[in-house]
Amino acid sequence: MKAAILALPSFNAQYVALGGSLQKPTAPYHEFTLTWDSPYATLDYGAEVAGFPTFEITNIDSPAQIEVKYSEQLSGLAEPLSDGPSLFVASLSNSFRVETFNITSSGQFSSELLQGGQRWQSIRLLTRNTVTIRSVSFKSSVGEVDIDNLPGSFQSSNKLYNEIWNLGARAVSLACFDAGSQTPTVQVSRQGTKVSSSTPNYAASSWNLTEYDLEFDAKISRGGFMWSVGYNFGIRSSGGVLLNLAGNYPEETTYLNTNKTLFPPSTITLAHGVNFVNQTTLTSYKLASFQVPFDVQEDVWYRISTSVRSGRLAVSLNQTQLFNVSLSNYYAGGSSISTSGAFGFGAWQDQSAYIRDVSARDTSGDLVYQDSMTNAATVLPEYNQHKNYFPTCVDGAKRDRLAWLGDFLHTTRIIGVTTNRSDHITGTFKLFLSDQLSTGQLPMAPSLGYSPEIAPKTFAVSGVAFLLPDYHILGLMSFASYMEQSNDTEFAREYWTAWKAAVNWLAEYRSNSTGLIDFSLFGSTFLGPTSGSAVNAASVEAFKGMASVATAVGDTSSAKKWAGIARSLQATLNDKLWSEEYGVYSIQESQPGNFSLAALGFAITSGSANATQIKRALSKLPSLKLGPGYRDSSLVSSSDSSANLSPNTNGFLLPALLQQKQAAPVAFLLDYLWGAMISNDSTTSGASWEYVNQESQPGLGQFTSLSHPWGGAATYALTQYVAGIRPVGFGYKSWVVEPAYAGFGLDEVNATVPTPHGPLSVAWTVQKDVVTVNVDAPAGTTGKLILSKDWACQGDFPSQNCAKVKDFVQTIEGGTVHHFIHRMSA
């Protein structure tokens, strides 16, 4: 509560509701008073925001406790744990979405812990007194967020489309941030390291420990603390062996809302997974609770010993053994509980404690780890608690605050047409490259706060490889997309050795027997089967894109090699995975009748499919329609009511459909899949979602990330294909404006794209069959205006015989505004 109030912009609550229970806020925000009879304030910020919760108290008649909840959905405020906790990884933010404060005087105070993303907030008075609050806000951790004044813009006669464009713009504004803006959740001092409200922060140097004895001192400040062993950095979803030591809950320091049932006083609770309760899609298992034979007091140092052996765990407190158990005696989903891996320290909601003098010895008694935990210079980068080293874009504002490699493809493209923060893109690439293995493989999802100097093998499976190898493909595509929009050859040359190694790593996974990219050694891939059509079509696009980058940096040898691989792989894709019988790209060779969205999208955008193949494959698309979107593949049952729709994979398809002038399915996705993110005021965040269910609600319930750039493909699709502004080659030195003037019922569109040469703007209108276009392009650039006859064949265009309509093409030199009027049916 004593964190400094930094000179940061603030997000202020916009609406408030007061009463004896939660209510949807409708009244404009004003100073308010909470009483025992009216203890609730429900707040609405109008859209997703992020930062440090801040309050200004103007009157308090006696010390008070308030419980504050944060949520992306309004309904989350009614849940005991709100829309959290987010315990997959520690991520330089509060792991919990409920926070309690003890207020003793008037004035302004701010939480020490960042909340990564929320629209809604509630404040509940827990004590029998009165508190008057003048202002409630968040000190921004993402800088200014002004969606209406970005370098890129899109406006049309369809209000829904304008709001859909804003979804991606806000998502990258909240999930991308400057270096050093995300601060530690721990405090390091001479007393030790204070942990508070955070999933365990794991010691990187302990990543490969197997059998050892861990010892440390701990002093509880409030409630208790957590520690964990057996954490595998390479398979983080399995979590670790979790332990929570609860104190004796003295009245003078214990919050009134403390959950003493989950962690009874003076006990150690044992669990396996990422959590002690199931509040996420990752199942965790509470295994046992052990009574400490004496009161565990606050503000008293205890020496804790944890003996870690294969399948066994023993814990002692001040040399009193509390338990010695075989973990095979406990059920954890049918799998064995591993104790190999890293150890770490954290604290449950509102808990806090000091940790010091950590050491570990192997079974021979040799010291294998030691840290006094009193030096911030060594503790913070070792335990993932250093301020973020690079400008970075994470997966979601509130949850999975990791830089996921595969998801960054959409993020890169959104930034290019919205914020134009190339430093956020290159900073994220630097983070990826700092964790690149010596083999060339790029990391799946690096954390924010570990030192870039830590050996990348620390975070790999068995120190040799990362999971989801197809994310590597999408990472290469992301870099090619960045080069297309920026022509940043200086950055490319600086890191060219690493990028070259990354492309060659992918080439090594081309099977000698089938000629396909084959990741079967990894067990699974995100896009579909490990040697299937989605993986291979995406690889064709990656090799082509990186061949163009190689040409741009003058590496003609690599360009020739990779272009050759792309041609050969494209031929193999069509030979092995195109089913002439079914008219689809088979999801894999053994399943010729099944197909996927991702494969269809990448087959088109990579140029692998010819016109006949495209026509036949697109004719099968209606069979994938499910609720407000398309299911990922034909393997997903259309009768499965629990199946979610992915804006990520539908986003791979979206530009492919627009390239083919397929207005009807695009309009369906915009109106219903992306429209679902706007239609319900209680769930809309103003940003793009992670998943949508068949009832057009958040697809993973409260766990769903509602500010997720991977769901924002519609933003760049609207700019590039509906407004029609796209680069030709790298950096918009050459460009095309090809509006979708028909098929979407639009009367007018205005859009601007930031380029390395200056803004490129287009404004077009349609009245009956007359298209009017203004193009304002930067000096020194050249482009073309194309009014394609193919759009005239869409259902809402008045031409009676689209076959007689011809393309209208004009070459344009930048540096002045060009005005065109053309009757398409002439």
Image (cartoon, rainbow, N blue to C red):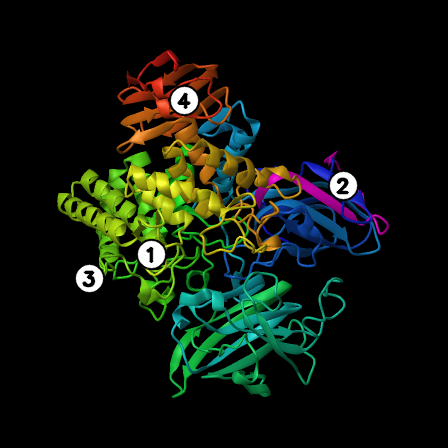
Visible in this render: residue 313? no
Q: Is mark 1 on a helix, strand or loop?
A: loop
Q: Considering the numbered disc 2 on the image, is that residue within a helix, a strand or a loop?
A: strand
**Which residue has dot 1 on it?**
532
Dot in front, 3 or 4: 4
* Structural crowding at the residue carrying mark 2, measured as other residues with C-alpha within 10 Å and reported as few (<14), some (14–19) or many (≥20): many
> Which residue bears the numbered disc 2?
17
Q: Is residue 792 left or right of residue 778?
A: right
Q: Which residue is drawn at 17% across and 44% down?
A: 559
Q: What residue type is labelled 3?
A: Asn
Residue 69: x and y in percent read: 67, 52
> How many badges with numbers are in the image?
4
Taking the magenta stretch, the answer to whether it contains residue 45 is yes
Mark-to-mark CA distance, 1 and 3: 16 Å
- The answer to whether mark 2 and mark 1 are in CB contact below 8 A is no
Disc 1 marks a residue whose amino acid type is Gly
Closer to the eye: label 2 or 4: 4
Q: Earlier in the sequence, mark 3 or mark 2?
A: 2
Numbered range of the magenta stretch: 27-50
